[in-house]
Each structure stands twice: as structure tokens, then as C-alpha cells.
Amino acid sequence: MDADRLIYTVIRKRYRIIRFLGSGAFGDTYLAEDLDLPSHPKCVVKQLKPKTSEPEVLLVARRLFESEAEFLYRLGQLSKQIPKLFAHFEENDEFYLVQEFVDGDNLTAEIIPGNKWSEGEVIKLLQEILEVLAVVHQQNIIHRDIKPQNLMRRREDGKIVLIDFGAVKEIKGLAANTQGQVTSTIVIGSNGYMPNEQANSKPRLCSDIYAVGVIGIQALTGKLPINFQEDPSNGEIIWRNKVNVSNKLADVLTKMVRYNFSQRYQTASEALQALSYISPARLKSTTSWKLPSRRKVLVATGVGAGILVILVLAPFIMLRTKTTENFTQLPCDAELSSLSLPPLPDKAYTMHKDGSKYHGYLVQNKKLNGKGTLLFKSGDRYDGELKNDKRDGCGKYSFLTETISHQHYIGQYVNDEPEGLGRLRWKNGNEYRGNFKNGKCDGYGVFQFANGSFKSGVWQKGNLSGEKIISCD
């Protein structure tokens, strides 16, 4: 079907196509409106069609489509800077994704050939891209097509939104050979931003790091990647002599775009750590701090399932050094940062013999699923998403008892534990922003004190790397 022929048609009796947005290796993209919701909000519909309709090809395409849709759905739940997946379905041997519409412009409107960015501007841009990419890499997912066209600057808040993940594009290139074996005939990626191992169909997480580094060099030099010079002896990009930047930034970018993938930063978190040491806002401090031991608090039990929260429960000793750190908005912030304690729904369920209660509208199969409020006997409160009796998704845990030093935790939960990106705040004004895993600080994070001082770096199982006396345990 010709792309224009879908205009004004309604697919799945719900999504009315209103405009053709463009074509790519994966298929066609349209702007649509959701007729099932009030005010008919806009969404993006992506149509993917295999090259052939042979049964064996459709079988592989269907399996790949389901798998990749699951990845996209999970990523959209983990970060506000990745479009949410609203629906995926198949009609007439064609596959459709319905995703959140991002109102904004891609980075080609900012990174213009001939215009050179300052060092500070490039550092900020790299941090913005790597912070959302870190969420993807934590799920062991490779984007595979990072370029300015796939990085949107959202109009409402100025945040970078990462779009068009490459994996699902394989569906377009599926074909069967004479022996009936189904393979993809498309190499996912874009010339100039794609490293050699990805061009050989062996992408790695650090392949994404290469693409981000190329964008940084593009912004610094004002040149398109296709115009970059390469050293014929080793394949390295020649760019250092084209710009006037500090050796620290040059070293970071050089490592990001190494020809040999083993010599690059292996994940977005590693690259972020390196950038944190050259940020113009970062001042070195010699004062140390230590977090006392963590306590465990049993807060509630769902139907047949215990709910255990393990969080850091003691304040830090404050640094005297005055510094500042620019924090970007973390996932869940937009939805939960300003979350007050709203009136409770009328319907309540007693969840535990200690009197803990659940307030919400969605109880499926006698399990807590959906969004609701948990009120604990201790006086603490949880507002957010639940799945199978456990906190899972975005949530806010408020420490309302006077004996607890915390004020609240806002962020992602997995299986009842802080997992992913989050923000933990103490009643004295101290705050940690960054990655959590199994209830511990784990990954890139920054601890900011009430007086504006901060410590940043990569945490591993509660400890800040390279600082033996700094611990989140």
C-alpha cells in the first residue's frame, strides 16, 4: 500500500492516520490520533512490513516483533525520555507500533554544519544523551542507530528524548534463502555514526558510545561525519587538530570513538563517569563522608506476598565545600516529583494483620495491579504503580514517621526494591540522585548536600568507586 493511501484511514478501529511523517529502512511512520480517548490525543504509528509474505518469514517476523515490542514497552516505563509504547498489533501481514508522540525538533536543528559548539556546550550535550542511554544499557539493550535525527529536544521541558530503536527494523529486512533459512538483509545503523563491528553485524553496547562520541566531535568541529578524516593506518578519526578544547575532553572523546571496540568506554555509565570529572561545574573536594549502616524496614504485606523496603536510612556528614551540579530530570520525576498526598479513594482493602491498607481501584485476580496507595501501620505511605502485590514501576515512598531520617524516595521500583534511576531525599535537605540496584546505590550517581556540596561517581553495591571510605551501606 502506498504511504499516502493510509491518510485519514482508521486502523484497528481506533487510530486515525492524519499525516505521513516519513520512511526509513524499517517502513513508514505516521502521525495519528487516538479516537478512543477524550480530546483524541496524538500518537505515532509505525508500519513495518517484511520484504516478502512467505510463511516462514512471517513466522520469524512475528516472533521478533513480539520480542522487540516487549523491550520497547519496558524501556518506555523506565524513562520519561524514551517514548512509551501504547500498542502493537498485526493486520494483513503488516506490523504496527503505536508510540507516544514527542512534540519537538531533532538535534539536526541544533547541530548545524559550519557552526562550532563550545566545550561546555558539548559536555552538557554528551551528558544529556548518555544519561538516557544509561537506562537502555542497564537493560543490556543496544540502540544501534544513535544520530542527531533520533535525538529529539522535547518542547515542553527541553529534555533529550531517544527515539527509533534499531532492533525492530530487522523486520523490514527479513528474507528466506533457497534453503528456507530466514535472515535479515539489513545492517542496522547509519553511515558515519556506525562503528566497524556494527557494520559487520556484531554490535555491542559500546557501539552506541561510538555514535555519541561522533555527535560530540560533529558539534565541536561543525563538520558532518562523512567529512571526517581517518588515519589509514589504524582507522582512527582525525579531529583533535581541528578544534581548541581541553586535553581532558579530547581524551574522553578519543576513547569514545576508538576504532577497536575493546578500547572504548563499554557502557553509557562508564562514559558518564569520565565526563563527570571534566564538567565545568565540578570542583574537587578533599573532605570525605561516610554513610552509616543501612536498616531494613518491613512495611506491609500484600495478599500472600511480603513487601520489604531496603533503603539507606541515615544522613551524611555535610561537606563544607560550596559547589553546584546541574541535575537533569530523572525518570518518574515529571509524574511523581510534585505528588502530594491526595484524598484517598473510597475503596480500601486491609492487606495485613497489622492494619496496613491498600487504597486503589485495580485489584485483579486478588493481586494488586495498577496504580494505588499503600498506607502502612508505621505511618509511612507509598503512592505509585504496583504489579502482582509488589511495587513495580514509578513510585513515591514517603517516610512520615518522626523517627525516620528520610523524607521520601521517588523513582523506579522492580520487584519491591528501588531499581533503576531514582531520587532519595533526607529530611535535613541532603539528596542522592542516580542509579539503584537491589535497594542500593549502584551505577552513576550524585549525592548533593543541603549546602550545595556534592560527590559524584560510579557506585558499586553501595560504595563509591575509588573512595574506600564513602559508602551507601
Image (tube, rainbow, N blue to C red):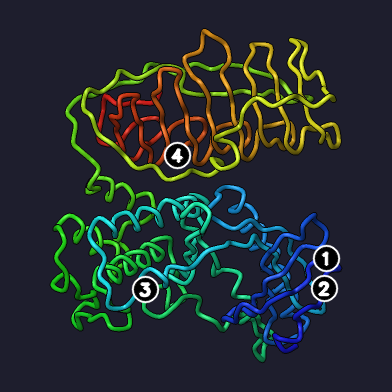
Give the residue number, with chain letter if any, for mark 1: 14
Foreground disc of the pair 3, 4:
4
Separation of marks 1 and 2 at Cα, in angstroms: 6 Å
Q: Is residue 284 above or below residue 3?
A: above
| Quarter in which the N terminus is drawn | bottom right
Report the front residue among 39 and 147.
39
Give the residue number, with chain letter if any, for mark 3: 195
User: Where does the image place residue 144, in percent across and percent down from the top left?
Assistant: 48, 68
User: Quick one: label 3, few (<14), some, or many (20+) residues within 10 Å?
Assistant: many
Foreground disc of the pair 2, 4:
2
Separation of marks 1 and 4 at Cα, in angstroms: 38 Å
User: Where does the image place residue 389, in percent across and percent down from the top left?
Assistant: 73, 31
**Which residue lies at the image location 42% right of the left edge and 78% below the top edge?**
199
Precedes in sequence: disc 3 or disc 1: 1
For the residues bearing labels 1 and 2, Cβ distance under 8 angstroms:
yes
**Which residue lies at the image location 46% right of the left edge and 53% below the top edge?**
132
Per the rendering, the mark at residue 435 is 4
Q: Is residue 219 above or below residue 128?
A: below
| Quarter in which the C terminus is drawn | top left
Separation of marks 3 and 4 at Cα, in angstroms: 28 Å
